[in-house]
Image (spheres, helix red, strand yellow):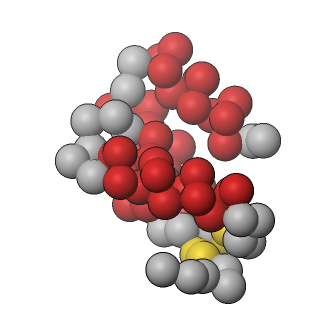
Amino acid sequence: MRYEALFVDTWGWMALGHRQEPRHQEVRRIYRDLRNTQVPIYTSDFVLDEFITLLFRREIYDEAVRWMSILRT
C-alpha cells in the first residue's frame, strides 16, 4: 500500500506501543515502513492524551516511559 500521509488514532498508537495487542507486529512493520519512506504521520494532542493515559494503565511504568521517549523522536 502506498500512502501520501497517515493520521494515527488512539488504537493505532496503542497497537504500536502495547506489545500484547493482537496486531502489534503488523502495525509495527507498517509504522517502520512509513518512517523509512518518510511518509508524514499525523495525530492530534487529544489522541496522544488518550493514548498516554491508556499506555500507563496497561503497561508497567518503565515500559510506558521507554515508549514515551521513543514517541518524542
In terms of image quadrants, where is residue 58? Answer: top left
Asked whether residue 45 is in view, the answer is no
Image quarter in which the C terminus is found: top right
Q: Measured along the vertical axis of the image, is residue 32 above or below residue 6?
A: above
Total of numbered circles in the picture?
Answer: 0
Residue at the outermost left position = 22
Q: Which of 56 and 30 is in front in this view?
A: 30
Q: Measured along the vertical axis of the image, is residue 53 above or below residue 5?
A: above
Residue under the image location 52 percent in, 43 percent down: 52
Q: At which x and y percent is residue 24?
A: 34, 46
Q: At which x and y percent is residue 37?
A: 71, 65
Q: Measured along the vertical axis of the image, is residue 14 above or below residue 2?
A: above
Q: At which x and y percent is residue 20?
A: 26, 36
Residue under the image location 48 percent in, 68 percent down: 9
Residue at the outermost top position = 62
Residue under the image location 76 percent in, 65 percent down: 38
Q: At which x and y percent is residue 7?
A: 58, 75
Asked whether residue 65 is in view, the answer is yes
In terms of image quadrants, where is residue 56? Answer: top left
Residue under the image location 41 percent in, 55 percent down: 27
Q: Is residue 34 left or right of residue 18?
A: right
